Image: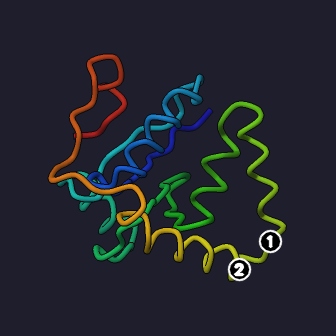
Amino acid sequence: MKMAIILFDGVCNFCDRSVQFIIRHDKKKVFQFASLQSEKGKELLIRHGVHEEVDSIVLIEDGRAFLESDAVIRISSRLRFPYSLGKFARIIPRRIRDVAYKQFAKRRYKWFGQKDQCSIPSKEVRDRFLS
């Protein structure tokens, strides 16, 4: 199975918890991670033509960048059951999915808080984070 890279907001508590969730349910270890704030994250955004101002999840897979709800759906489809059922959200038109995604993303700091800096991954998963 091909590797994929998830770029995430490293100061967002919800995003950090989402990364931990993905790590727990990605038994095939297909995902690697980098924060959007890291040098590697910024480099990958530029390389894949994504505006540096993006502040939400980005999935890089097969040489392409996927944003917002497309990224979430593609990530969930590669997790084990029942989380893989998220792939069926594709039946909802992207415009509707992305409006809902943006509304949630806009409020995530208010609802879940944020950190002053990115977390340091534990030794057990450090090799999955790009530096």
In the figure, is residue 40 to the left or right of 58?
left
Q: Is residue 3 left or right of residue 33?
A: right
In the image, 2 versus 131, the foreground residue is 131
Residue type at numbered disc 2: Ile
In this rendering, is residue 94 above or below 113? below
Mark 2: few, some, or many residues within 10 Å (few <14, many ≥20)? few
Image mark for residue 92: 1
Residue under label 2: 96
Q: Is residue 70 above or below residue 31?
A: below
Asked which colour scheme the image uses, the reply is rainbow
Q: Is residue 15 above or below residue 66?
A: above
Look at 28% across and 73% down and name the residue there: 52
Q: Measuring 49% from the left and 37% from the top, which residue is drawn there?
A: 31
Q: What secondary structure is marked by label 2?
A: helix
Which class describes the residues within 10 Å of circle 1: few (<14), some (14-19), or many (20+)? few
Distance from the alpha carbon under mark 1 to that under mark 2: 7 Å
Which sits in the foreground, 58 or 13?
Answer: 13
Q: Are marks 1 and 2 in contact (CB under 8 Å)?
A: yes
Question: Relative to residue 98, is residue 7 drawn left or right?
Answer: left
Looking at the rendering, in which quadrant would you find the N terminus? top right
Above or below 99: residue 23: above
Q: Quadrant of residue 99?
A: bottom right
Residue at the image point whose x is 68% and y is 82% from the top: 95
Q: Residue at x 59, y 23 (%)?
A: 27
